[in-house]
Image (cartoon, rainbow, N blue to C red):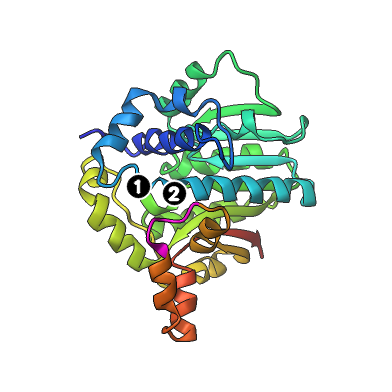
Amino acid sequence: MAIEHVSDTARWVAVYRAMETERPDAIFTDPFARRLAGERGQAIVDEVTQGRSMAWAMITRTAVFDEMILDLIKREKVDLVVNLACGLDARAWRLDVPRELRWVDVDFPVMIDYKTEILKNERPVCRYEAIAVDLTDDGARSALFARIGADAQRALVISEGLLIYLTPEQVSTLARDLHSQSSFRWWLIDLAHPQLLKMMTKMWGGSVSGGNAPFLFGPEEGTGFFLPLGWRETSFRSQGDEARRLNREMRGMWIWRWMSIFYSKKQRETWRRFAGYVMFERT
């Protein structure tokens, strides 16, 4: 199996960022993605079912996260970005963010060490720190949040591609720990509908489960899951709508759009929220 650990999914997604960067009409550029993905990342894409044809979803997510991050930093004068399960994300090197912004990447030690080595000769755009922590370790996670939260006032937390690999109980605990820090004002996530979770498991379940990275989190109540935990939705951007806007739709998507005209209003809204990107604000 090419995927041996959940952190290997970061190599998988890095290949998609490299594929987009190499297009003449690229909607974002990540000049570090190909190096970071390495041969292992390409092997994963080559092995998993529809590895290349499903690139559109990760490419859309990257582009929309870029937009939402930059917009919030500018509009709300964010002073800290906490990038949980950062993987091989190189936004601290490639985004046009203020030099005085503090950016903290957090991930498993093996991933932090690997990325640090690959990018050791590159200079981040802003004040950068990499911290090696297993985010499923409750004590270590809480201590980390308390330490970095104490030195900020207007922090944005990012958890791109993380929650889907956690149980609902783990997501609840994470949400409460984030809310316990008053400086953590916003939280940006990607969220899947439970039916999408089933489809992804059917397509890729063998690959990800074999590497101890099964798809676990797709709550029936959607963003309502987070409200009792101290986080309310302020913005939702549908993956389908955004992919169409960015001209990165899945092949044959027009058929699904045509079929949707026969859906009820409730069914159309469920379809719109099948997958998306959510900005939360603490309550």
Q: Residue lying at the far top in this picture: please name it.
A: 121
The numbered dot on residue 56 is 2
Q: Quadrant of residue 25?
A: top right
Q: Position of residue 215 (x, y in %)?
A: 32, 53
Taking the image as shown, residue 229 lies to the left or right of residue 186, namely left
Secondary structure of the residue carrying tag 2 is helix
Q: Residue at x 26, y 56 (%)?
A: 201
Q: Residue lying at the far front in this picture: please name it.
A: 24
Q: Quadrant of residue 134?
A: top left
Secondary structure of the residue carrying tag 1 is loop
Q: Nearer the viewer, residue 108 or 239?
A: 239
Circles 1 and 2, Cβ within 8 Å, touching? The answer is yes
Dominant secondary structure of the residues highlighted in magenta in the image: loop
Vertical comparison of 89 with 254: above or below = above
Q: Nearer the viewer, residue 145 or 67?
A: 67
Q: Nearer the viewer, residue 102 or 266?
A: 266
Q: Position of residue 7 (x, y in %)?
A: 37, 35
Q: Is residue 3 visible?
A: no
Taking the image as shown, residue 180 lies to the left or right of residue 160, namely right
Inspect the image, locate mark 1, and give the three-letter code of the amino acid beneath it: Ser
Residue range (magenta) = 248-253
In the image, residue 213 lies in the stretch drawn in magenta = no
Give the quadrant of the C terminus.
bottom right
- Rate crowding at label 2 as few (under 14), some (14 to 19) or many (20 or more) other CA atoms within 10 Å: many
Q: Is residue 233 visible?
A: yes
Q: Position of residue 148 (x, y in %)?
A: 64, 37
Inspect the image, locate mark 2, and give the three-letter code of the amino acid beneath it: Trp
Q: Which residue is mark 1?
A: 53
Q: Position of residue 200 (x, y in %)?
A: 30, 56
